[in-house]
Amino acid sequence: MDLKVDGLSKLIVLFIGIFGFLYSLYSLSYNRRRAPNSEPNHIPGNYHTYYLITLGASFGVALTDNLLLFVFLWGLLGLTLYKLIKGHNEESSAAAKKTLVLIGASDSVLILGIGLLYICSHTFKISDIHLGTTTTLSTVAFLSLLIACMTKAGAFPFHTWIPDYTKDAPASISAYLPASLDKLLGIYFLARMCMSTFILSGWVTLLLLIIGALTIITSVLMALVQHNYKRLLGYCAVSQVGYMITGLALGTPLGIAGGLFHMVNHAIYKGGLFLTAGSVEKHTGKEELGELGGLCKYMPVTFAAALVFALSISGIPPLNGFYSKWMIYTGIIEFGSGKGIANQLWMIWLTLAMLGSSLTLASFVKLISGIYLGRKNEQIGTVKEVGFPMFFPQIFLAMLCIAFGIFAARWVIPEFFEFTGIGSWKSLPGLWNAPSVSIMILISIIVGFIIYWMGTLKTSRRSDSFVGGEKLQQELSFSSLEFYKTIGTMKFFNYFYDKANKKWFDVYHLGKECVLGLSSALSVCHTGILSTYVVWVVLGVATIMVLLII
């Protein structure tokens, strides 16, 4: 059995182990009885069995150096992904079926790619395969493996299973698989392909950059208009994959390191966001932003952790999400010094990446405001903070977000370069001193609190708000659902959202419609006469024999 441990695989195994422990601890409390007004617990009875199988298979994918063992473990992860959500209710069953079809189809393409790799290299050992993307066979092999990576990680246009899955799956499962492990493993395999297995040609680099840019923009635009906070998190998880693909596509040490560092950072803050979402769901039984509000007073630890995660994914300094995005931005500028077509378009890649980060911040202003700020919904009963098994993983991940941001340049990134073997770390171009900026931000926050506290010392009169002489009712107040509502009325965005609602960008829906249409057309031949069927069988066998002989 071929197993290989290098810096990149050790990095993946380390964080798989960390997330495996934290999410199992979280599940101990999350899987118990939930809010009285919520739906029945959707955790499968054999949850921990599938959880451990997933953990073991993930370790195997990161450590194996044999393509046959790799494809077996990769496929096993698709089955556990399906079993962890299947059968909870009608909607979750539909999401599970969609996930299984897309992941299963991509696994079939993966097998095709591995077969072509063997034809080109005559070996199944991953570390011994080094190919270009100039011949037809090697190009088709690369594209086949790329589709498998994109589907697993959730890149456009093979991403639509993730928002559906995260909406209907328990938060602990969403944090464990789509938010963390699937991103780690999908991007890990893509990094293997880009760093050692294939030498990327100019058109492949351009293709990857286009995929990265489309993934960033299309998904974050969809996140802006979501009302279900778990679905919003799902689209934001897809959007961040675009940054990882963009970093790897650059092909420079800085770009690759930025893409891999963002992969780790995303697994940290996105997993944390799903954990905070699970805490809210457990104690309120609500998933719609319009039904929540004002929870920061009752769940202060969850609110603080969610705020850190939201700022991190939005690329706000000095948190880890900012630093990995800053590395990717800098890598794009460095990439622009090249002479290829993709290099000359560096300004487009940089603009779209920065725009995506701004729109991500807008999405999380909506989420944080809708769940934690404002007035508490009167329909929600008593709410309290979650217990230690649920808030410890959130706090631990939030501290990682802070530490990986403040100490990135001094300790994290140099070790990251040495750990993964990407190259030697010097320093980032430009002026950025995270510790100094962190101190200034902390001082500003303290001064702000002092000013606020001094304002509360003054005697003031508070009264309710009135509209037309009547006391403002809960249903008439301005909610987070009104945020960015005008975007959908703009000409371009209205066209985009209209096509998205018609599922023009959903590969699963388009494939299903094609299959149903083809089946309807072929149903004309379904006469019910046995002799006709025999003729079709004979013609089919004859066609196959002719093709095999040729």
Image (tube, rainbow, N blue to C red):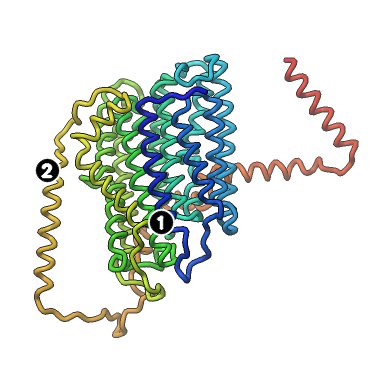
Residue at the (26%, 79%) spot, across then down: 465
Is the residue 66 above or below the residue 172 in the image? Answer: above
Residue at the (34%, 51%) spot, across then down: 393
Residue at the (47%, 65%) spot, across then down: 33
Is the residue 299 above or below the residue 111 in the image? Answer: below
Tell me residue 5's x, y (percent).
Answer: 40, 25
In the rendered structure, are the residues bearing label 2 and label 1 in contact, judged by CB atoms less than 8 Å apart? no
Foreground of the two, 176 or 261: 176
Residue type at the position of mark 2: Ser
Is the residue 548 above or below the residue 246 in the image? Answer: above
Residue linked to disc 1: 225
**Residue 520 image-quadrant placement:** top right
Please give left or right for residue 346 compared with residue 21 in the image.
left
Please give left or right for residue 163 compared with residue 213 in the image.
right
Residue type at the position of mark 1: Val
Tell me residue 310's x, y (percent).
Answer: 30, 52
Does residue 111 appear in this view? Answer: yes
Q: Quadrant of the C terminus?
A: top right
Tell me residue 477's x, y (percent).
Answer: 34, 73
Does residue 204 appear in this view? Answer: no
Secondary element type, mark 2 = helix
Tell me residue 185's x, y (percent).
Answer: 44, 35
Residue linked to disc 2: 436
Mark seen at residue 119 = none
Give the mark nearest the N terminus, 2 or 1. 1
Mark 1 packing: few (<14 Cα in 10 Å), some, or many (20+)?
A: some
Foreground of the two, 410 or 108: 410
Residue at the (41%, 37%) spot, across then down: 184
